Image (spheres, helix red, strand yellow):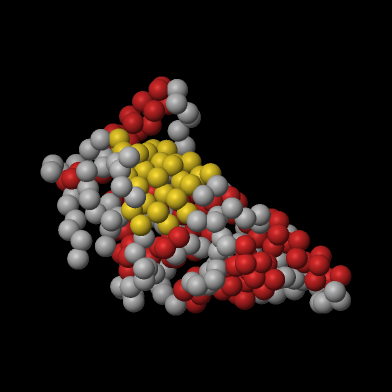
């Protein structure tokens, strides 16, 4: 079992102090002129509220490789420690305020072309528009297909590479865990960024509707729309608590420091 050490916990720091420190870090980053920071802000008790944000976080929580450090990541992101998070094709670059200001990078593999084609084919005729897709107004069948553990849209640990320049040698330090959750919070507000991150075009899912109709298939169903019943899809309860450890899968890679 990996040895974990909390380098940021030599001295107790209150939540209010953490928030003030994070706010100062955001202001300092803005003054540096490198770029306008894009902090992760959690509003309310629930970290995420939409299909896309919840689905991302639930996908992380069902992998035992991530379970040990995810609770600390939740605390960090709630206190505003992720002061900058930028999502580009295949990469999430972030800065996290801890004892120091740490650079975090999460690389996510593109969805393989064959898998994406299969997803588009299986969802053909199910999604009325890009707007409905991004709002998470999906039938239970489509939602289950997108969230499929082996062949869906969300990445597995083997498709994620983690990097943080903090002194913690753990596979998944709390700064990385905070960023992983921060991605879910960002997807709550900008779900299209998931498709950017995984290097696929969300329009492909809707384009299949026209192709299906040309072949004489039935028109898109306005079937029962779910408010993201993720408990049923993932087989676990949605809560702030981390689910019980499940069967281990392959461990994500953490690249060495540069």
Q: How many marks?
A: 0
The structure residue drawn at horizontal position 58% and vertical position 50%, both measured from the top left corner, is: 196
Position above or below: 233 against 49 = below
* Front one among 97 and 50: 97
List x then y, in percent, for residue 166. 26, 42
Image vertical order of residue 209 relative to residue 24, above or below: below
In screen coordinates, is 257 left or right of 7?
right
Q: Position of residue 146 (x, y in %)?
A: 57, 68
Residue under the image location 48 percent in, 62 percent down: 155
Q: Residue at x 30, y 43 (%)?
A: 257
Identify the residue at image location x=28%, y=56%. Answer: 171
Vertical position of residue 217 compared to residue 5: above or below: below
> Which quadrant is the N terminus positioned in?
bottom left
In terms of depth relative to the viewer, which is nearer, 27 or 167? 167
Residue 249 position within the rendered picture, expressed as x and y whole percent measured from the top left: 36, 71
Nearest the viewer among 233 and 167 is: 167
- Relative placement, left or right, of 224 versus 23 is right
Q: Which image quadrant: the C terminus?
A: top left
- Residue 141 figure quarter: bottom right
Give the residue at the far left of this rendering: 10
Residue 63 x %, y %: 37, 68
The quadrant where residue 45 appears: bottom left
Asked whether residue 95 is in view, the answer is yes
């Amino acid at each position: 079992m990996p040895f974990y050490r909390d380098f940021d916990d030599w001295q107790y720091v209150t939540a209010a102090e953490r928030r003030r420190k994070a706010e100062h870090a955001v202001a300092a980053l803005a003054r540096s002129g490198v770029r306008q920071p894009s902090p992760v802000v959690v509003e309310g008790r629930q970290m995420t509220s939409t299909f896309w944000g919840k689905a991302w976080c639930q996908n992380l929580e069902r992998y035992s490789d991530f379970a040990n450090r995810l609770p600390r990541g939740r605390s960090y992101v709630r206190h505003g420690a992720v002061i900058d998070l930028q999502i580009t094709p295949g990469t999430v670059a972030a800065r996290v305020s801890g004892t120091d200001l740490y650079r975090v990078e999460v690389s996510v593999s593109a969805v393989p072309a064959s898998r994406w084609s299969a997803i588009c084919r299986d969802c053909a005729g199910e999604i009325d528009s890009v707007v409905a897709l991004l709002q998470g107004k999906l039938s239970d069948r489509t939602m289950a297909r997108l969230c499929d553990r082996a062949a869906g849209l969300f990445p597995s640990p083997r498709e994620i590479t983690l990097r943080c320049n903090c002194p913690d040698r753990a596979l998944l330090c709390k700064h990385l865990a905070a960023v992983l959750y921060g991605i879910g919070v960002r997807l709550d507000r900008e779900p299209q960024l998931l498709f950017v991150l995984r290097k696929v075009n969300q329009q492909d899912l809707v384009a299949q509707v026209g192709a299906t109709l040309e072949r004489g298939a039935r028109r898109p169903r306005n079937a029962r729309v779910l408010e993201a019943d993720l408990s049923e899809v993932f087989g676990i309860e949605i809560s702030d608590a981390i689910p019980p450890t499940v069967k281990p899968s392959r461990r994500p890679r953490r690249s060495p420091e540069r």
